């Protein structure tokens, strides 16, 4: 019973780590609480992991350049402060979650962590559907969802046009659902599964894909990234590539069934969700009104000064494209530092496992592509997996080497763990 409660606690904490606005704590988002607990544990453990500190240093360089940009422009805003609080909170929240994770699974594999993340995303999608069909449930979850006045108005204006979920909506919902699709693709291609498990994985994939699509069409980018990953893993010799055909056939059948069900239960905004496919069928172009508008939103600085220092303000100024917003905020040097910071979040999670490395690289590319739509990152995901490997390296792998009489001088990539099925949730 204690084990079950601990597993449920890990799932709940990961859920609110991914969707922090879903549960306000003392007027702040959930990660302020989980981050504070993580910071306390981090100080207790005497600031472990030099690698993690290097991630913070790189973010510090980005923040320093943003402040320098404010100085050069003679103006600024609170955007950097807000972003910094979120990044730091996610950093220590991730540290806390991994400690919880290993309490529940002392020898838990990275795949087990992925199951938790997928489970949290699936749970959010289920809640989203229930909220759509039950006003009482929607009222309850909206009452505990931290939203400012603008978010409330925007939800009210668009509630008849798309699914609005608990804890997240719009662009962010599509990003997270896309991540879930990528992780499912990795597990299907690398984990031994029987037919029922493969079909269930295809069912979960289809459900997240459609609910994500009805929340934000950005989900299509995640679906494309997951298909790219499947192809890469198939070509590079995934362990269980024979599962590929069963999974693809199952997914196609379920997608066809799902498409029909969408027009039955979500008829009022099905055409909006499938606009790209409808335009391709009618005009031969895989575009939407939103993607067409993005072409007009690609704006670059007109002066060398702005290219180098930006304009010192990161607030929204009518253009969604992430790259454009970064350029006008911190200039090209700051933009490069931002993406280097995102890379550093992933760097220490790279291992000897090529399939896992491809998964992280595809996910990083996914984030880069998303920034052609809006300002995006997956800090909550990459820091989780990084702290997983750092914990494994220093608390499991090195002690094991010491017990054999060796002294470990290798890098994190030499500390990758594979785990038998009995260790999975």
Image: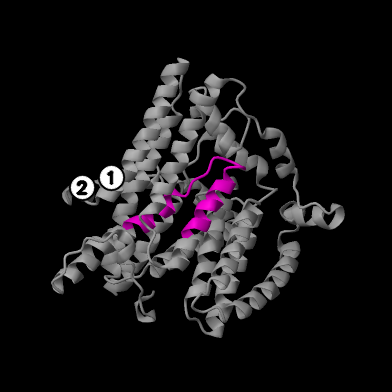
Please report contact status of discs 2 and 1: CB closer than 8 Å, yes or no. Answer: yes
Which one is nearer the viewer's eye here, 154 or 330? 330
Image quarter (top left, top right, bottom left or bottom right) of the C terminus: bottom left
Residue 319 place in picture, x, y as percent: 63, 32
Residue 35 visible somewhere in the drawing = yes
112 displayed left or right of 140: left
The Cα–Cα distance between marks 2 and 1, rounded to whole angstroms, is: 8 Å
In the displayed structure image, the side of residue 307 where residue 51 appears, left or right: left
Circle 1 sits on which residue? 53
Q: Residue at x 62, y 54 (%)?
A: 221
Residue under pointer 2: 47
Which colour style is shown?
Answer: one colour
- Placement of 57 over or under 106, stated as above or below: above
Residue 134, how many percent across, how many down? 60, 58
* Local SS, label 1: helix
Q: Which of marks 2 and 1 is nearer the N terminus?
A: 2
Label 2 or label 1, whichever lies nearer to me, is 1
Q: Is residue 196 above or below residue 319?
A: below
Which of the 4 quarters of the picture holds residue 82?
A: top left
Q: Residue furthest top?
A: 74
Q: Residue 413 carries which label?
A: none
Whether the magenta-drawn stretch holds residue 361 is answered as yes
Looking at this rendering, what residue extends furthest in the right direction?
Answer: 282
How would you classify the magenta stretch by its main secondary structure?
Answer: helix
In which quadrant of the rendered image does the N terminus lie?
A: bottom left
Is residue 164 highlighted in magenta?
Answer: no
Left or right placement of residue 344 versus residue 391 in this view: right
Indicate whether 64 appears above or below 211: above
Give the residue displayed 58% in from the left and 41% down from the top: 374
Q: Give the range drawn in magenta.
A: 360-387
Of 277 and 357, nearer the camera is 357
Residue 307, percent across and down?
54, 25
């Amino acid at each position: 019973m204690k084990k079950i409660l601990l597993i449920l606690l890990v799932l709940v904490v990961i859920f609110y780590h991914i969707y922090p606005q879903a549960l306000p704590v003392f007027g702040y988002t959930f990660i302020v609480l989980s981050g504070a607990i993580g910071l306390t544990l981090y100080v207790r453990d005497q600031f472990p992991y030099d690698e993690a500190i290097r991630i913070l240093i790189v973010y510090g360089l980005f923040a320093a350049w943003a402040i320098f940009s404010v100085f050069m422009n003679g103006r600024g805003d609170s955007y950097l402060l807000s972003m910094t609080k979120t990044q730091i909170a996610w950093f220590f929240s991730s540290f806390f979650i991994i400690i919880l994770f290993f309490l529940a699974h002392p020898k838990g594999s990275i795949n087990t962590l992925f199951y938790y993340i997928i489970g949290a995303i699936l749970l959010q999608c289920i809640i989203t559907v229930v909220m759509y069909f039950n006003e009482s449930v929607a009222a309850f979850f909206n009452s505990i969802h931290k939203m400012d006045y603008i978010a409330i108005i925007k939800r009210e204006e668009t509630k008849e046009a798309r699914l609005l979920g608990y804890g997240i909506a719009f662009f962010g919902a599509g990003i997270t659902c896309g991540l879930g699709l990528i992780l499912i693709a990795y597990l299907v291609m690398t984990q031994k599964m029987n037919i029922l498990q493969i079909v269930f994985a295809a069912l979960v994939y289809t459900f997240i894909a459609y609910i994500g699509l009805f929340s934000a069409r950005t989900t299509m980018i995640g679906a494309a990234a997951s298909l790219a990953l499947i192809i890469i893993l198939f070509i590079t010799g995934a362990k269980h590539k024979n599962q590929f055909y069963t999974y693809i056939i199952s997914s196609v059948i379920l997608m066809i069934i799902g498409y029909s069900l969408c027009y039955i239960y979500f008829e009022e905004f099905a055409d909006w969700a499938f606009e790209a496919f409808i335009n391709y069928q009618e005009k031969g172009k895989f575009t939407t009104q939103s993607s067409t508008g993005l072409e007009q939103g690609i704006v670059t600085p007109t002066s060398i000064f702005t290219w180098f220092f930006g304009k010192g303000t990161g607030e929204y100024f009518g253009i969604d494209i992430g790259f454009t917003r970064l350029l006008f905020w911190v200039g090209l040097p700051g933009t490069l530092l931002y993406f280097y910071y995102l890379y550093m979040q992933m760097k220490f999670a790279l291992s000897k496992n090529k399939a896992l490395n491809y998964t992280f690289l595809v996910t990083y590319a996914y984030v880069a592509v998303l920034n052609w739509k809006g300002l995006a990152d997956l800090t909550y995901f990459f820091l989780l997996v990084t702290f997983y490997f750092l914990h494994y390296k220093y608390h499991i792998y090195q002690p094991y080497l010491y017990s054999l009489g060796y002294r470990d001088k290798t890098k994190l990539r030499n500390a990758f763990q594979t785990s038998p099925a009995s260790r999975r949730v």
